[in-house]
């Protein structure tokens, strides 16, 4: 879905708005393209994925956490991440923990597949596709800097994406 190592343009679009220091969480990080990018931009990164082999390829500066987010408990006790990033992953029961992990004033950057993707390819199961406006509803009490429900090219895919900031205090 992306060039190897190339971060999502949704993440890079917000580079100037995100904190220059602090803590970031990359959820379902895979090979770590976003964890690396966040590290390069001055953040202390925790990366979570169920694939232990993928986590072994992360830089030593990344706090790698192996966990099956769909089967076990939320593996992190901390709720003080300045940036929480999720791309190409959807597990709705995780939303309360994700939102609670964002520090007051922190950012949630989220991008994943949306309704309409089933006409273009995988994933196609409704459980893995956001309903229209679903991310907006999840972040209803937050400051939404941008939201898109759109079709992207190369490869063609339907996504929803949001950049939202938790209220301070």
Image (cartoon, rainbow, N blue to C red):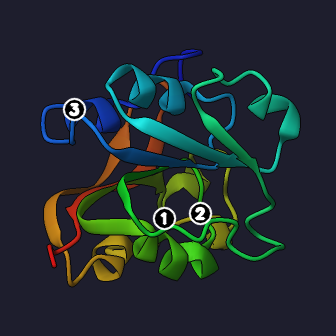
Q: Position of residue 126 (x, y in %)?
A: 63, 71
Using the numbered discs, state the Cα–Cα distance from disc 1 to disc 3 in whole angstroms.
28 Å
Relative side of 140 to 6, left or right: left
Q: Which mark is residue 133?
A: none
Residue depicted at 36% across the width and 71% down the height: 135
Q: Position of residue 90 (x, y in %)?
A: 59, 63
Circle nearer the N terminus (1, 2): 2
Judged by depth in the image, the label closer to the viewer, 1 or 2, is: 2
How far is mark 1 from mark 2, CA to CA?
12 Å
Q: Tell me, yes or no, whether the two marked residues, 3 and 2, touch with CB atoms within 8 Å.
A: no
Q: In this orientation, which residue lies closer to the viewer: 107 or 60?
A: 60
**Quadrant of the image for the N terminus?**
top right
User: Of the numbered discs in the image, which one, if any, rests on residue 115?
Assistant: 1
Q: Earlier in the sequence, mark 1 or mark 3?
A: 3
Residues at marks 1 and 3 touching, judged by CB atoms closer than 8 Å: no
The residue that disc 2 covers is 90
Q: In the rendered image, which residue does mark 3 sit on?
A: 15
The residue drawn where x is 68% and y is 28% is 31
Q: Residue at x 13, y 41 (%)?
A: 17
3 or 2: tag closer to the N-terminus: 3
Q: Could you tell whether 148 is left or right of 154 in the image?
A: left
* Mark 2 residue element: loop
Q: Neighbour class for label 1 at 10 Å: few (<14), some, many (≥20)? A: many
Mark 3 residue crowding within 10 angstroms, few (<14) / some (14–19) / many (20+):
few
Verify CB contact (< 8 Å) between mark 1 and mark 2. no
> Eyeballing the image, is 166 above or below 112?
below
Instruction: Determine whether 22 is above or below 84 in the image.
Output: above
Q: Give the SS element for disc 1.
A: loop
Question: Quick check: 12 left or right of 38?
Answer: left
Say which of marks 3 and 2 sits in front: 3
């Amino acid at each position: 879905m992306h060039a190897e190592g190339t971060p999502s343009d949704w993440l890079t679009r917000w580079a100037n708005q995100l904190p220059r220091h602090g803590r970031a969480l990359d959820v379902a990080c895979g090979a770590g393209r976003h964890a690396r990018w966040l590290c390069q931009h001055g953040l202390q990164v925790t990366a979570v994925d169920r694939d232990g082999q993928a986590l072994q390829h992360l830089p030593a500066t990344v706090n790698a956490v192996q966990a099956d987010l769909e089967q076990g408990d939320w593996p992190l006790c901390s709720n003080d991440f300045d940036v929480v990033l999720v791309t190409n992953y959807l597990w709705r029961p995780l939303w309360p923990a994700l939102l609670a992990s964002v520090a007051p004033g922190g950012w949630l950057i989220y991008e994943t597949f949306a309704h309409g993707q089933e006409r273009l390819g995988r994933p196609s199961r409704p459980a893995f596709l956001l309903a229209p406006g679903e991310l907006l509803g999840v972040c209803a009490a937050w400051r939404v800097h941008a939201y898109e429900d759109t079709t992207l090219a190369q490869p063609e895919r339907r996504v929803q994406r949001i950049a939202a900031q938790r209220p301070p205090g």
